[in-house]
Image: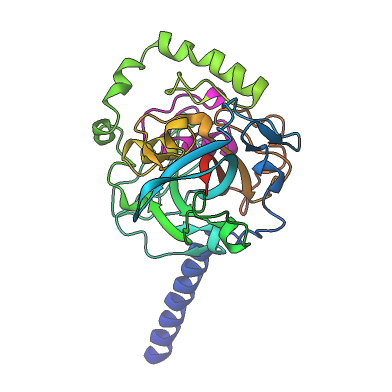
Amino acid sequence: MWKKLQLNRRLFFLTLLSISLESNAQLCNGRFPNPITDVCWTCMFPIKIGSISISTGQRDNGDSSPPLICSCYRPPIPVKIPGVGVSYWEPARVAEVVREPMCSPTLGGVNLGGSGDSSAGSNSGSGSSGKLIAPRGTNRAGVNEENDAFYHVHWIQFPVLNWLGMVMGSGCGKGETFDMAYMSELDPLWDSDEASFVLNPDAVLFANPVAQLACVPDSLKALTTNFGIDSLFWCSGSHGSVFPLTGNTSGHLGGLETTLALAHRMVFKLHREGLGMDTSTPAAICYNLPQPVLRKNQYKEHILYPIPLTSKAFGFGVSTGLWGAGREFPYKGEDFTYMIWRKVRCCEL
């Protein structure tokens, strides 16, 4: 009798363990993006060769045309080599914005390892209680009643042009490979507004109503022209302020709006850390240059997961009101991935 009770107890605990493991596995969902059907290939346009523009109706960011004739040094050759000036939009990165630490929707919904000391994120606060961010060492975080949210962001090198054999010559080709380049779970600054101040001390200049009111024209310009105002670098259009450079957001209204804002923050953060580069200004036609203050109109984005948008890409700060309906839903539609396009100006040799 005693042995039977012991066996039943063990079976009971094994059942609970299997349910727990299955529950944790179900927290991470996703699929690898199809480079043919999930990417907005018309978003590469307009392509400019000198002053000649090849367009498919996609809006550009207002940059000037590259020079038709250019020249750049190409080591080990000690003299400048002439070439042709080209500009285009490159699908270069994928941003994953997720609630569960180490979850990668782009890799098919796999968990890349234990959460370790990472805080988990949430995306809604209605009717829930607790703190926004769990202490390090716990698995998941609660959410407060003020609709604050916290997400992790992964930055993935996604050289889809290389995969499809669409890379240009030595002047414009980057030769990159697929790589999980940045994970916020490994960044001690991502879940601390105070610690992240070392990256953005200039945030104190914009933490006032006047500076935030200046974001209204940025939002209007993003809505009407698809791109915001570069000089208002602390604004993210209809998504609010870029600062702080963490995964914490307040006034959560929906997963799309919040995760798009965090994708913008991650790009700004990478530029501030010297990991994001200027690829689009006239000075960067030969080599990518450091750009510690993000020129946000160098980028645009479109959603890949859960439901891809393949007709258009949007600059930072554009409202989701025109395209976001039906792209957020419970269970498998609460984590998001975005294709990040960057403007490239280069001298094709």
Expressed as whole percent of the image width and height from the top left, the position of residue 154 reads: 44, 51
Identify the coloring.
rainbow
128 inside magenta stretch: no
Is residue 259 in view from this perspective? yes
Relative to residue 159, is residue 247 depicted above or below? above
Q: Residue at x 40, y 55 (%)?
A: 181
Relative to residue 11, is residue 332 depicted above or below? above
Q: Residue at x 54, y 18 (%)?
A: 218
259 inside magenta stretch: yes
Expressed as whole percent of the image width and height from the top left, the position of residue 61 reads: 60, 28
User: Which corner quadrant holds the N terminus?
Assistant: bottom left
Query: Is 232 placed left or right of 68 in the picture?
Result: left
Residue 162: quadrant of the picture: bottom right
Residues 57 and 140: in front is: 57
Residues 241 and 165: in front is: 165
Residues 274 and 253: in front is: 274
Residues in magenta, as a range = 237-266
| Residue that protrudes farthest toward the right in the picture | 56
Residues 298 and 211: in front is: 298
Expressed as whole percent of the image width and height from the top left, the position of residue 245 reads: 36, 34
Query: Is 40 placed left or right of 201 in the picture?
Result: right
| Residue that protrudes farthest toward the front in the picture | 79
Q: Residue at x 64, y 51 (%)?
A: 306
Q: Residue at x 43, y 58 (%)?
A: 180
Is residue 126 in view from this perspective? no
Expressed as whole percent of the image width and height from the top left, the position of residue 80 reads: 41, 44
Relative to residue 288, is residue 194 depicted above or below? above
Q: How many marks?
A: 0
Relative to residue 82, is residue 146 depicted above or below? above
